[in-house]
Amino acid sequence: MKVRSKFTKVICIFLAALMLLTTFGMLFTQIAFAANDDDSSSSSSSDDDGELPTSTGSLRLITKPQFYRVDSDGNDIDDEPTKKVKEGYRYRVEFTVLDRSVNDDEVDGFTGGFVASNGGYFDTVIDTDGNFESSVTRVRGSSSGYLELEVEAYVKFNGKGRTMSFDVGYTYYKESNSSSDESSSTDRTYHESSGTVVTKIAEAIVTDGSEDDEDSYLIATPNIIVTGYNYGGQEVMAGSEFPLTITFQNTSDTLALENIIMDITTTTDLAIANGSNSTYIEKLGKGEKQTKTLQMSTFSSTEPKPQQVTVKFTYEYILDKTRKTGERTEELAIPVVQLDRFSIGELSVPSQLWPGDSTYLSVEYVNKGKTTISNLAARLESDVPGISDSQTIGNIAPGESGTIDFSFTANDSGSISGKVVIIYEDAKGDEKEIERPFSATVMDMGGMYPDDGMANMPMPMPEENNKTSAVTIVMAVVGGLMVAGLTATIIVKKVKAKREEEQDEDI
């Protein structure tokens, strides 16, 4: 019995010691977890597919970067983050950092930030169209008393390593109240903070195209776009030739294009002046641009409006070791205008006028062009009070002509001047103005010419003894002629009778 009692005591002591060790172990584990929680600014909880993120400097990475695959316009392709990062693909990466150099109570506002890759195996994607914009999206306080920054960056994986490094900076301000006897105001003091964030990406990385990738279909289909074109000026004159220069680009930064055919088709009023409407381009590299120029011509009867040119590209490219084809069509607009051949003649005006008489001015017009002239109007302007007028003629069809007439009355003698102003709109709708000046002299009623000195010369008076009027003289002349005619007739008859008598005597 004593032996059994001793064995039981040993067992109890062993169990008590084991329980004591277990208690100390649990206490140590809790202390270790607490220490790990206090250092959460340098790491986050591990997961099944990657390493813990790391960082250096005053900025500490506190969340694991999440990668979202995006298309060529910067839009997310999937709602969930991807677990594979492939060379040549674009990603939107999100992560949060803690800035241990700035206390939360030192900040009243945030004005902006920047994010840029400074090394590692990821390049910052920059797009001039604004599709990709890396930035600090939010600044907020944290339970630790420091500032937390939410960061969004657009990157492209360019190598076989796992390191990603970013320069992150932002501007914040602190407000303070200042007061005086008269007024109070709020002053802002601005500060900048920046640092570098370095992290390692998970092991699940695909670095080349040697393996089949279930996401290969996510590569954006390459396209050719027209990035610019010109036609030698702001507009093209109907009936002329002009160079059409077209610049186009391969939109893909991962795939080259080959065997490219550029076909040009136009409206019936445009034509290619020389050469073929098809152009062959052997290759267009990743993101490459090329420029081609064609000589075009317009017909003289072309309507004054934008004429359409269609550019169609067909091309080939290789994706996943398979040759594929694609095509793209672009529409260009060429503004064509007609030559303005609306003509205004010279103004017809008398050189001498009489006070109180109505005087007429006239000017002829003709539309020699092939388009209608719109809203033809005219107005009479003069420096003499009371001499003014205006009228609207309307639209003038091609080949139509007419006359614009004005009338006025000058009441005082002397020199007058003015102008007739013709206004119309051409085929483009642009308003044009033509002036025709005039000048004339209004006679003085005291003489034929007010300024030639004839008004002071005395007019000759008829003599009192000469009372024969013009009528009397005419009657006398007529009477004399009649008498002379009668006398001549009598003489002729007498001569004829005498000759007859002489002939009878001879017989």
Image: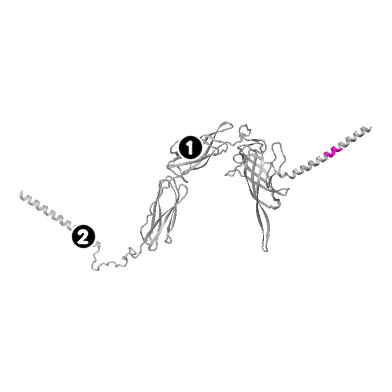
Q: Amino acid at mark 2?
A: Val
| Extreme-right residue of the structure | 1
Residue picked out by circle 1: 265
Q: Separation of disc 1 and disc 2 at Cα?
A: 94 Å
The x, y position of residue 305, in whole percent, is 47, 44
SS category of the residue bearing label 2 = helix
In the figure, 410 relative to 499: above or below? below
Q: Main secondary structure of the magenta part?
A: helix
Residue picked out by circle 2: 477
Q: Is residue 310 visible?
A: yes
SS category of the residue bearing label 1 = strand
Residue at the image point whose x is 50% and y is 38% from the top: 310
- The image quadrant of residue 30 is top right
Magenta-highlighted residues? 16-21
Relative depth, front residue between 216 and 408: 216
As drawn, is 151 to the left or to the right of 258? Answer: right
